[in-house]
Image: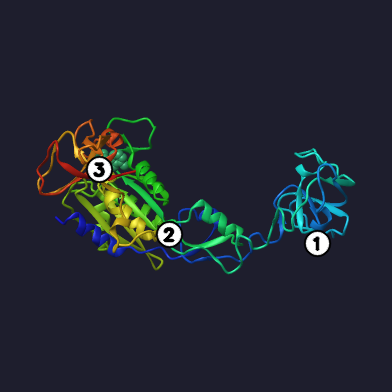
Amino acid sequence: MITVEEHRAAVLAAVSRLPARRVPLAEALGCVLAEDVVAVLSVPPFDNSAMDGYAVRSEDVAAATEAEPVRLRVIADLPAGSGERPEVLPGTAVRIMTGAPMPPGADAVVPVERTDQPAGPGAGSALPDVVAIQAPAAPGAHVRRAGDDVTPGTVVVPAGIELRPRDLSTAASTGHGSLPVHPRARLGVLSTGSELVDPGAPLAHGQIPDSNTTMVAALAETLGVTPVPLGAVDDDPDALRRRLQDSLARVDAIVTTGGVSAGAYDVVKEVLAPLGEVAFTTVAMQPGKPQGFGVLHEDGRGVPIFCLPGNPVSVFVSFVVFVEPALRVMAGRGTAEAPQTLQPVLVDALVGEGWRCPPGRRQYMPVVLDDRPEDDGGPYLLARPASRGGSGSHLVASLAEADALAIVDAEVQAVTEGDVVTVMMVP
Ligand code: AMP
Ligand code: MG
């Protein structure tokens, strides 16, 4: 048996960041940016109005008051998006909407509320011949200058960040329709077992729903990884071999579940072990002891393959402990040198109700967490085993009930009330 750390190190040594590629903005959310985003456009790209109102020459309206308004001839209408450039000569004005380009000659905008004209949608559809300006406007009033926000050449989003919605909108405003990113990995999800049928389908005697495909695909989605469901295959070596061959070209990594222990129908091991590229080991952990990992080769590309055991709790724990860190590396979000970037958050919890632990194996125990008052300086959280009973790797309901996995070292034989344990906050 090898330790969890040894197996994880072997996995991480074999995976690397996916090569950067340009993707449309709509596909870039959550991806790690591969190069700085440098503004191509100014923001705003031209001088424009900050208000709905009238573009004027400020000197024309310097003396305007409500009692003695200045009347200007309205020579044109400029909605946002207009390409017109009507010239504002002394004694004239142009009706202008927010975001429309300032017309030549005008140097200020008087908001419609400071005129005799009605404000609001529809109210101003007929362009008046004359507008009465009821207040002065200083030069530049209500004008947004070209480049006020950003000038071309400015780095607006630095390389290395995980792109958020506002980063994408900044890229769009500054002239980009696509960005170079480490793309979302595509994770092939393949379940094995002749007993499996699609969730929700009727069951014959001996059959069970395939819950692992759903779980692994959903876990992938929580990480911004695109799941590629490859279906469930029977415990038939040829069928499995064919399914893998047909799938390799469309995925960046594969997770299989089931078929890796010592049974007579453990087909994953039977098919992959002879290839020599996938190693099957036992890891000193509970659940998740049998593990396979390797790299398949397809068209000059390495496709990491994780062969997890079949029990759903084992799949969950194996995914969080081994697959998730590898997917984070592939996305460019973390590296083996900074392991804290590769796993969910760890916190301390006080044990409210103890449990037994397997000898010689690191235990990942599904636990329920409750808040506790911290007036004694202890942890904020109280942990107890998920109530539907222990850490049996087939107990899916206790997994759903759990808030976290308590991590218990191999040499600990029992966790008792009052102990402090480290728990991993899991999706
Ligand atoms: P195996 O490792 O293939 O012997 O599977 C171990 C246990 O997990 C067996 O009870 C299987 O029926 C169950 N199992 C395997 N694959 C799945 C799956 N995709 N969904 C639900 N249970 C499964
Ligand atoms: Mg099986």
Residue located beneath label 3 in the image: 405
Residue depth check, mark 2 versus mark 3: number of the one nearer the observer:
3
The residues tagged by marks 2 and 1 sit, at their Cα atoms, a distance apart of 58 Å
Residue type at tag 1: Pro
How crowded pointer 2 is (Cα within 10 Å; few <14, some 14-19, many 20+) is rated as few
Residue depth check, mark 2 versus mark 1: number of the one nearer the observer:
1
Query: Where is residue 109 shown, x and y percent of the image?
Result: 76, 52
**Left of 26 or right of it: where is 419?**
left
User: Is residue 273 at least partly visible in the picture?
Assistant: yes
Residue located beneath label 2 in the image: 249
Residue type at tag 3: Leu
* Precedes in sequence: disc 2 or disc 3: 2
Query: Where is residue 98 shown, x and y percent of the image?
Result: 72, 50
Q: Quadrant of ligand 2?
A: top left
Query: In front here: 294 or 332?
Result: 332
User: Is residue 274 at least partly visible in the picture?
Assistant: no
Disc marking residue 195:
none
How crowded pointer 3 is (Cα within 10 Å; few <14, some 14-19, many 20+) is rated as many
State yes or no: discs 2 and 3 in contact (Cβ < 8 Å): no
**Left of 356 or right of it: where is 97?**
right
SS class, disc 1: loop
SS class, disc 3: strand
Residue located beneath label 1 in the image: 104
SS class, disc 2: helix
How crowded pointer 1 is (Cα within 10 Å; few <14, some 14-19, many 20+) is rated as some
The residue sitting at 61% across, 58% down in the picture is: 173
**Left of 190 or right of it: where is 363?**
left
